[in-house]
Amino acid sequence: MKILLCASEVVPFVKTGGLADVAGALPLVLEGLGEEIIIALPRYKAIQEPKFKIQRLSADISFSLIGRKVKVYFIENDQYFNRDGLYGDKNGDYQDNLDRFTYYARRSLDLLKEINFKPDIIHVHDWQAALIPVYLKTLYRNDKFYKDIRTVLTIHNIGYQGLFPQDEFPKLGLDWSLFNMENLEFYNQVNILKGGMVFADIVNTVSTTYSKEIQTQEFGFGLEGILSKRKSDVFGVLNGLDYTIWNPETDKLIAKNYSAANPKAKSLDKEDLQKICGLPIKKEIPLFGIVSRLAEQKGFDILAEGIERICKMDLQLVILGTGDLKYHLILGDIVKKFPQVISLHLKFDDTLAHKIYAGSDIFLMPSKYEPCGLGQMISLRYGTIPLVFKTGGLADTVDEGNGFVFDQYNQEELIKTVKKASRAFKNANKWSKLIQKAMGCNFSWETSARKYIQLYEKAKSK
Ligand code: ADP
């Protein structure tokens, strides 16, 4: 099959979140499975020689290679993309985001003709690429070249929809008849993700549970109606984990390597982490770890409510994250009160993240909602037992067999579960069995990539 993948961030070029991981990893696995795949990405300022090997195709298109020979085409336009940020700066979103991603969508489609690559499928991700399915079925519909192309839209987080004022609608070049409730209008605004959801042949999200949750009012952010309408075309495919990066046997960033067959050295990683964090070096106390954006979505509202009670328990807690100022302040205060219990790192730090995944006993991830989530999958691989709220991708990857789960989102339930996990930790025999279970879980990309191929086939038959 021939596939074009369109995403606004792709590892190793640019990354602000999990989308980049998916867009960078999935094509390589698809290539390995025999598919012919190319990628189109805006050429942001960060994409430069010599960091990347870049070749020129034409005046405004360059390209680079990833994997064996996956071509990543860069859409160049200095006015739109030659900036430090991807979507905005310290003042918020860029004012011209609609112009920028409209340009990206159209230029990606036009590029196909120029390089004479006629894909069976265009796999678009999130609102930034969601205009492509819209254009294929409107502005490009009478062009023979594009006639047979089918689309799959992957939604990584339905909270981000690409909303713009109504008076920006003409920038899309679409007929005003599409500005209505059935198409791109959303309470008098333009909603780009909604457009993609209406026009894509197949829509999916990044876990089965989340694909169902977003069809409800509680999780749908106002788009549950359109999703329910398209129910038979909506699917969930769990993201995979890149085990070449996340593997305690080979991880160069942790103090000691270990494996499921020989997990003993994990205790040395715990010691290392305690040392780095200035916490008392004690084997017998459960060490909880958090690596996360500090945001309400990640459970920091109930965590902030309960943190003082948690700190009074016989445990230790290491937190690595950045995000809402509110949580920076709350956590900063708590550290002053309990310096022997909690260690706080308000930054983005890949090395420390690896050390936390390896050195903690329990990984705390009480997200209020979670489309897929990587943290729990990483921690399982490192034999660090996840404690999660039962939602989205967390519900699909963690259960009582490999972790601790609470199913009512409130402070009391969180604390109860922290206590339960701490008690379980004291039973060394049971705990090592739990570690074995966790480390035996497999969320490899190959399984997920095969599911995407099935979705592509479904789209093709439309
Ligand atoms: P998100 O909703 O933020 O994309 P995910 O769980 O899907 O959440 O992925 C977050 C990824 O970013 C994980 O790999 C996690 O380890 C990493 N991460 C989050 N915050 C930090 C941080 N402060 N420092 C280092 N890595 C981080």
Image: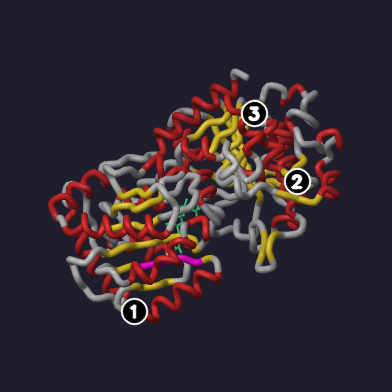
Q: Nearer the viewer, mark 2 or mark 3?
A: 3
**Looking at this rendering, what residue extends furthest in the top direction?**
461
Q: Position of residue 322 (x, y in %)?
A: 50, 67
Whether the residue carrying mark 1 lies under 8 Å from ligand 1 is answered with no
In-front residue for pair 13/228 = 228
Image vertical order of residue 422 relative to residue 178, above or below? below
Earlier-in-chain disc, 3 versus 1: 3
Q: Quadrant of the C terminus?
A: top right
Count of numbered tags: 3
The label shown at residue 229 is 3
Q: Which residue is mark 2?
A: 103
Residue 335 painted magenta: no
- From the image, give the main secondary structure of the stretch colored magenta: strand
Left or right for 205, reference 312: right
Earlier-in-chain disc, 1 versus 2: 2
Visual colour scheme:
secondary structure
| Numbered range of the magenta stretch | 318-322
What element does badge 2 sit on? helix
Residue at horizontal 47%, vertical 45%? 372
Earlier-in-chain disc, 2 versus 3: 2
Residue at horizontal 80%, vertical 46%? 188
* Amino acid on which the number 1 mark rests in the picture: Pro
Q: Which residue is mark 1?
A: 339
Residue at horizontal 64%, vertical 63%? 84
Query: Alpha carbon of mark 2 to alpha carbon of mark 3: how far?
Result: 29 Å
Image vertical order of residue 106 relative to residue 276, above or below? above
Image vertical order of residue 179 relative to residue 294, above or below? above
Q: Residues within 10 Å of mark 1 (few under 14, many from 20)?
A: some
**Looking at this rendering, what residue extends furthest in the front direction?**
412
Q: Residues within 10 Å of mark 2 (few under 14, many from 20)?
A: some
* Amino acid on which the number 2 mark rests in the picture: Tyr
Query: Alpha carbon of mark 3 to alpha carbon of mark 1: how far?
Result: 52 Å
